[in-house]
Image (cartoon, rainbow, N blue to C red):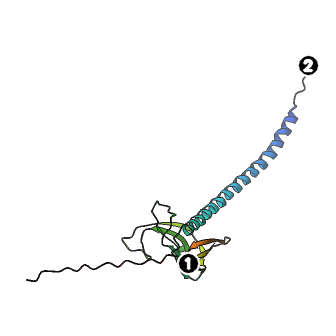
Amino acid sequence: MFHRRAFTLIEVLISIMLLGIIIPALYSSVSLLRDSNEQLLGYLTKARQTTKATEVLFLDIASSDGNLTLHKEDDLSRLCIEQTSNSLYGVGNPKVCWLVLKENNTLVRVEGVGYHLPLKFEERVEANRVMSQVEMFQVYRSKDKAQSTILVLLKQKGKEAISFMIQGIDKPIKRVKKKKKKSVSTSPDS
């Protein structure tokens, strides 16, 4: 006959006690890992939104016809691009303006056709909130003869500043505004 040695009651109790010590430690480390992953996911989501915003701004400028209008107030600018081939809404050669609203210093991208700021009641545009708490949004343009360089500086509160440069933007084409011809009506004299 074979005699198998079985676990004694004391050995079983000791192993249960050891598991009782190890399992809470493992659970807390898993909990810390889960919290860390949630924070990393939140950070990556915000970073992805910032990256997407700067990518759209870059494409708006790089795809423009060179007609850029810059308005500066303190550390905040307003950039209007008269025509760009980069449209988020399938509009053919839209006008795009990037501006910082005073409420919560929110950077907004406005896309439409032939609108003026401030908007008139009948003008239709699409506006996207890009980021809030913007401390600095500056756009600079070099004054070269044939092509110019655009420098963009963007800083959100509590974050590192973002800057990028676009070279080779064509000089703006001067547009001649068409004047409406007045129609002269002649009325027969009686």
Compared to 30, does 7 lie above or below?
Answer: above
Q: Residue furthest top?
A: 1
Compared to 20, does 155 lie above or below?
Answer: below
Nearer the camera: disc 1 or disc 2: 1
Relative placement, left or right, of 69 versus 183 is right
The residue lying at 80 percent from left, 44 percent from top is: 20
Measuring from the top left, give residue 134's x and y in whole percent.
59, 73
Relative placement, left or right, of 184 versus 143 is left
Compared to 19, does 74 lie above or below?
Answer: below
The residue that disc 2 covers is 2
The residue that disc 1 covers is 77
Measuring from the top left, give residue 100's x and y in whole percent.
54, 74
Find numbered disc 2 in the image and state the secondary structure of the residue it sits on. loop
Find numbered disc 1 in the image and state the secondary structure of the residue it sits on. strand
Q: Residues within 10 Å of mark 1 (few under 14, many from 20)?
A: some
Q: Residue furthest left?
A: 190
* Separation of residues labelled 1 and 2 (CA atoms): 89 Å
